[in-house]
Each structure stands twice: as structure tokens, then as C-alpha cells.
Image (cartoon, rainbow, N blue to C red):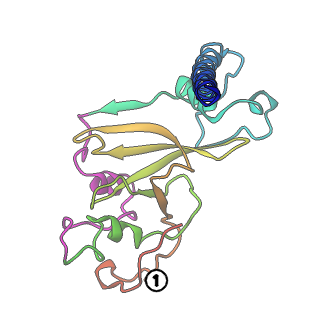
Amino acid sequence: MKTHKFIVYIRVFFIYILIFTSCSKEDIIVFEETKEKDLNFEYYKIDLSKPYTDLSKDKRFKDLTKQQVLSILKYYSPNTISTSKQNCSNCVHHVTSIDSRLMPSDSGCDIHYKWTNTGCLKGKMKLINSCNPTVGSAVIMDTGIPEGHVAYVEKIVYQFGDPLLKINEGNRPSGVCRTVWLSVDDAMIKGYQNPNRSINCSNGPFYACASPYSSC
């Protein structure tokens, strides 16, 4: 009898724990949504017309979450989307059309060329020459496909946390050109190709570059 009561008490205890945990998570979600809705965008008005913006000394942004700062950035410099721009169906060609020094021409992601052309993620990664973004750099990303992805860094915003990037990309999703904001701590980011720095093969012909690919 005592054993039966003990088991019942244990079950009741775990039920209370489950209910408390579930309610806590819901409360947190509601709280976060409320904080987003309560943002006074006029109070956080910023000028994002320049390539670089430094918010790290602006006390208005000190206690905001990264998502709140991103919401403000999207408000004052909205994401854009287009299907009519050139090279929207190839991310490499799209980046190269912005700056011809970025991402040498690719020939598709073939098993024989995966290290020596930018049609493959490993070929893109071989061009990484910086772990820090600059406006005008190419950001190389692992999106879970053999080809990987590359985009052009259009704006950088420094804040109290990790810097935030506005990137210009093609073919993500397929056939679309767009600009989007993301954080430099995004798990997809592998590194950057800075066109003002030499690449791993000392600016020799990319197809002849024998050095291993790198990442940050």
C-alpha cells in the first residue's frame, strides 16, 4: 500500500513538473512576442544609408536582443526580392556580376573539379582569405547542398553583440535575387573572400591552385 502511494506521489510530482515547464515555455514565447510588438521604431530610428553603421556606442540598443535589432534593421532597410535582375539563377554569377574579382567562373559541381572551381562548396571555400566580413566581400555558406552558396556583403552593422550583415544573393530560393539580414554567427557561414586580399594560391590561376580549402 505504501509503495502504491509512493508511486502515485511520484507520478503527480512529474505531472506538476511537466505542467510548470510547459507553462514556462509558453510564457517565454508570449513575452518575446510582446517585446517585439512593443518596439518603438521611431525611438530606434537609424540611418542605414552608409555601408557601415556602428551601434555599439548607442545606449538605446544596449539591452535589445539580436532579433529585436534585426527587426529594427529590416524596418529601416527592408529585405528586397526580385526575379527580373541578371544572374538570379546562379549565385556565383550573381556575385561576380557585382564585383568581377570575386568567385572565378564555375563549371558546375562535378566530382572531378570539386576542389578547383566555385561551382562546388569546397571550391568556394578554397577562396576564403578572411574570417572577418567587410563590405564588398563574398560570404561563403554551407547550405546543405554540394554546391554550397555565396553572397555579396552589402552592409555591416556593428552592435553590442555579433555584427549583422545585409547580403545580396542570387538563386536562394531558386531563380530569385534578394537582400536579407543575418548575423555573422549564422551556422551556415564558413568564411569570406575579401577581393582586396590575395587568395591561398597567391592570386595564381584558380584552376592551378593546389592549396587546401580553408574555413573559419
Q: Quadrant of residue 118?
A: bottom left
Residue that carries the numbered disc 1 in the rendered image: 202
Residue 99 location in percent, x, y? 39, 57
* Magenta extent: 83-111
Label 1: how many Cα within 10 Å (few below 14, some 14–19, many 20+): few
Question: Residue at 28% of width from left, 71% of height from top?
Answer: 117
Q: Quadrant of residue 101?
A: bottom left
Q: Quadrant of residue 3?
A: top right
Where 61 falls versus 120 (above or below)? above
Residue 189 location in percent, x, y? 47, 55
Residue 55 location in percent, x, y? 72, 37
Say which amino acid is labelled 1: Ser
Q: Nearer the viewer, residue 30 or 146?
A: 30
Residue 165 location in percent, x, y? 54, 44
Where 150 falls versus 202 (above or below)? above
SS type, badge 1:
loop
Q: Is residue 122 magenta?
A: no
* Outermost residue toward the front in this view: 1
Q: Is residue 4 left or right of residue 53?
A: left
